[in-house]
Amino acid sequence: MPELSETAVNNFEHLVDYYGIENIVRALSHICSEKSIHIAENWQDTNTAKVWMGYSVILDGALQKIESEGL
């Protein structure tokens, strides 16, 4: 996977500034979950689907931590 360029990092920073880290993490979790479902249903690749669902679970845990800290 390619490394993020400085421009890409700056673009992400602007997204976080605008939407907030909580909403970004929530969106990433949702994207991972949807990718998992899509892969399982359309490609029958349960191993890859589990990886994407695992990412979603990790991000959900981070989101709960963010929400509980009230930042």
Image: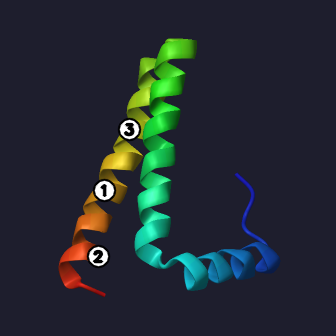
Alpha carbon of mark 2 to alpha carbon of mark 1: how far? Answer: 10 Å
CB atoms of marks 2 and 1 within 8 Å: no
Q: Residue at x 70, y 77 (%)?
A: 9
Residue at image x 42%, y 52%? 29
Q: Position of residue 66 (x, y in %)?
A: 29, 76
| Residue at which label 2 appears | 66
Q: As shown in the figure, which amino acid type bears the numbered disc 3?
A: Met
Amino acid type of disc 1? Asp
| Residue 51: image location, x then y, percent | 42, 37
Residue identified by numbered label 1: 60
Q: Is residue 13 left or right of residue 23?
A: right
Is disc 2 surrounded by few (<14), some (14 to 19) or many (20+) residues within 10 Å? some
Tag 2, which secondary structure?
helix
Quick one: label 2 or label 1, which is nearer the N terminus?
1
Residue 67 against residue 69 in the figure, above or below: above
Distance from the alpha carbon under mark 3 to that under mark 1? 10 Å
Q: Secondary structure at mark 3?
A: helix
User: Label 2 sits on what residue type?
Assistant: Ile
